[in-house]
Each structure stands twice: as C-alpha cells, then as structure tokens.
Image: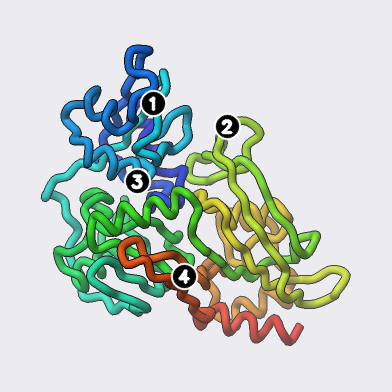
C-alpha cells in the first residue's frame, strides 16, 4: 500500500481520531519506521524518536496519545511500552500556518467550557472539520471564532482542537481540546475506549433480538470507497451494545423503533453499519438505508421534516484529563427527530 493510501485508510478507519471518510490528506505525512532486533525491547517513544530524528520524544508521545502510531494495524498508545521488531506507522499532521480555516461567527450550543476543553451540542448538517466541498460552516470554523488561538494544534491545520467526530448529519455531544495536554489526555481516553457514549437512533423496522451486542470487523468497502462495510477479513473490531427502547406499529413486526446504542469502540459509521446489518437502518440514512420504510413511516418522516439519518449522540461522559473531574453530558433529541418520534408514537 502506498503511503498516501495508508494515510487515507488511517484517516477513514477511526471515528475516535476525528477523521472523516473523505478527509483530506494534504496536511498529513506518513512515516514507516522499521525496527530491527538491535532495538527490540527498548522503550517505544524513545526508540521511535531516535529512529525518526525529525520528531522529538514529546512529539512522538503526542502522536501516540492521539492514536496516530500503529503497529500491525493496531494503535500503540503506551509510550513506556517495549518496542517490537517490525514496521511502525506514524501519521503526522503537518504543523504549518498556511491553510488554517477561517474563523466564523457561527452560534454554538456550549454545554461546558474551561481553559482546557469545550463541550458542545453539534447540530445536524454541520461537519466537524473542513474537507473537500466543506471549507466553511464547520465546527472548526465556529470554534476558531469562539476560542480564538487557544485550540490544540495536535489535530493538524484543518482540524485544530478536534479529538473525535460525528458525521455531518449526526447531531449531538462533542468535545474539543483547547490545549495540547487536554488533547493528548482525551485522545488516550478515546483510544482506550474509556468514554461513555450513548446514541439514540430511530430505525426502519426493529433489530432482533430487541437487546444485544453486535461485534464485527468494519473497514473500507471494497465496492464503494466512500462507504464502510462489515468485513470477513481485515478491518478493525467494532462493538456496539444496543436495546430497543420503543417499537412502533405492530408488536410482531414493528415498522420503526427507538434504539439506544452504546459504543464500546468508535469506528467510522459504526452504528449506521451495525444497525443496517440487523435489518434496521437509521431512518433517512441515504448511504446505508437500503429499502423503503412503510408508507405510514414515510409520511411521518415527511411531516417531521427529517432530511438526514435519524441518529443523535445523546450522552458523552468522561473524566476530565486535566482536573480529574467526572463529566457527563446528555442532550435531548433535536427538533426533527423529536417531531418524528411524536408521529411514530401515533402509529
């Protein structure tokens, strides 16, 4: 695989890394470090800094905390661990001042803010960061206006402060880092899955059984590079715990459902792919929602004005990486999903 292809794969593979499926790679560099027997067993961060002298040890540690160092396709986050023989891949955001997105006075719903981080309720229709065809109107543009120059730079020029992401048309709670130390700490929490994340989906049909865990390998679709897919070989482990909170329509054969999903991992499009695999895609999902809802559900969607996938990141909980405070944020359904749910209740 060429370095540019590898960068694109890394960009697309981890929701935790705040990187979109079609994220630009121009501000990234990929370095492959071959570790021989003479370095085996030495401390990882120190060895990588020696073998890649253009990076300081601190910079290597920051990349590891952000999940941007991999070995055998797995993130390496323990800087004090012992290095193994083989190839280590480092995806390095290029630190420059050119190409910085413009700040824009876009209103933000701020749930929490201190000198280290900011938590917001992202609306549907807002991309997390700039990308091809989405150079403005993103969360990054809004954060640059709101936070000024305090945003962490680890995410690279196009993604200052961004630690994780939500799809453009998914609403809900997001956290961004205002300092590099907070970015490193948050990235480590995401990489180690030490984050509480709960989503609400309104689905076509209802998954069966009504409660369970979906465990698969998810990676880039071999048929459509803009889509993710469940793979038999390759990909990365993806685990979603779900339960049907409410079914709408016939009890034996529901036309729709409210499904609560809790993420154990955070792969790109994970919930959307997993629910579709159970025959219950998110309503309004144009990418993974093959098949048509029942007529009463289609009518309800039209009356509610739903024009995107009915998926909302309702809960985000974590331990503050700097202060140690336990934080938990929960937001209600946005208006389009709330209106749809009201109409589904009447089925």
What is the distance, in whole Å, between disc 1 and disc 4 at their CAs? Answer: 40 Å
Q: Secondary structure at mark 1?
A: loop
Compared with 40, 193 (above or below) is below
Closest to the camera, between mark 2 and mark 1, is 1
The residue lying at 72 percent from left, 54 percent from top is: 278
- Residue 212, picture quadrant: bottom right
Are discs 2 and 4 less than 8 Å apart at CB?
no
Would you say 156 lies left or right of 321 here? left
What is the distance, in whole Å, between disc 1 and disc 3 at their CAs? Answer: 16 Å
Q: Earlier in the sequence, mark 2 or mark 4?
A: 4
Q: Which residue is mark 3?
A: 65
Q: Earlier in the sequence, mark 1 or mark 3?
A: 3
Q: Earlier in the sequence, mark 2 or mark 1?
A: 1
Q: Secondary structure at mark 3?
A: helix
Compared with 227, 301 (above or below) is below
Question: Where, quadrant-wise, is the C terminus in this rendering?
Answer: bottom right
The residue lying at 76 percent from left, 77 percent from top is: 248
Q: Which residue is mark 4?
A: 171
Report if residue 26 is visible in the image: no
Q: Residues within 10 Å of mark 1 (few under 14, many from 20)?
A: many
Q: Earlier in the sequence, mark 1 or mark 4?
A: 1
Of residues 269 and 22, the one drawn nearer to the viewer in this rendering: 269
């Amino acid at each position: 695989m060429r370095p540019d292809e590898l960068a694109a794969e890394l960009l697309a593979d981890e929701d935790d890394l705040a990187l979109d499926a079609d994220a630009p790679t121009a501000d990234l560099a990929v370095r492959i470090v071959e570790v021989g027997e003479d370095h085996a067993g030495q401390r990882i961060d120190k060895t990588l800094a020696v073998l890649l002298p253009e990076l300081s040890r601190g910079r290597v540690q920051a990349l590891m905390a952000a999940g941007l160092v991999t070995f055998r396709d797995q993130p390496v986050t323990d800087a004090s661990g012992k290095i193994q023989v083989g190839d280590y891949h480092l995806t390095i955001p290029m630190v420059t001042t050119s190409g910085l997105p413009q700040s824009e006075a876009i209103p933000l719903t701020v749930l929490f803010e201190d000198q280290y981080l900011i938590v917001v309720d992202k609306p549907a229709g807002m991309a997390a960061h700039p990308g091809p065809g989405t150079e403005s109107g993103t969360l990054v543009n809004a954060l640059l206006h709101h936070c000024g120059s305090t945003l962490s730079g680890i995410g690279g020029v196009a993604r200052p402060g961004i630690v994780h992401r939500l799809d453009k048309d998914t609403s809900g709670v997001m956290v961004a880092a205002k300092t590099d130390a907070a970015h490193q700490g948050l990235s480590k929490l995401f990489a180690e899955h030490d984050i509480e994340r709960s989503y609400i989906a309104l689905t076509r049909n209802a998954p069966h059984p009504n409660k369970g865990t979906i465990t698969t390998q998810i990676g880039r679709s071999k048929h459509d590079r803009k889509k993710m897919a469940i793979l038999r070989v390759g990909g990365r482990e993806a685990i979603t715990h779900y339960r049907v909170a409410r079914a709408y329509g016939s009890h034996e054969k529901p036309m729709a459902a409210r499904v609560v999903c809790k993420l154990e991992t955070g792969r790109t499009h994970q919930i959307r792919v997993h629910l579709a695999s159970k025959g219950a895609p998110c309503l309004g999902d144009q990418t993974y929602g093959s098949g048509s809802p029942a007529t009463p559900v289609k009518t309800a969607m039209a009356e509610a004005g739903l024009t995107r996938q009915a998926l909302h990141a309702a809960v985000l909980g974590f331990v503050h990486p700097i202060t140690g405070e336990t934080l938990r944020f929960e937001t209600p359904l946005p208006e389009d999903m709330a209106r749809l749910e009201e109409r589904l209740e009447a089925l």
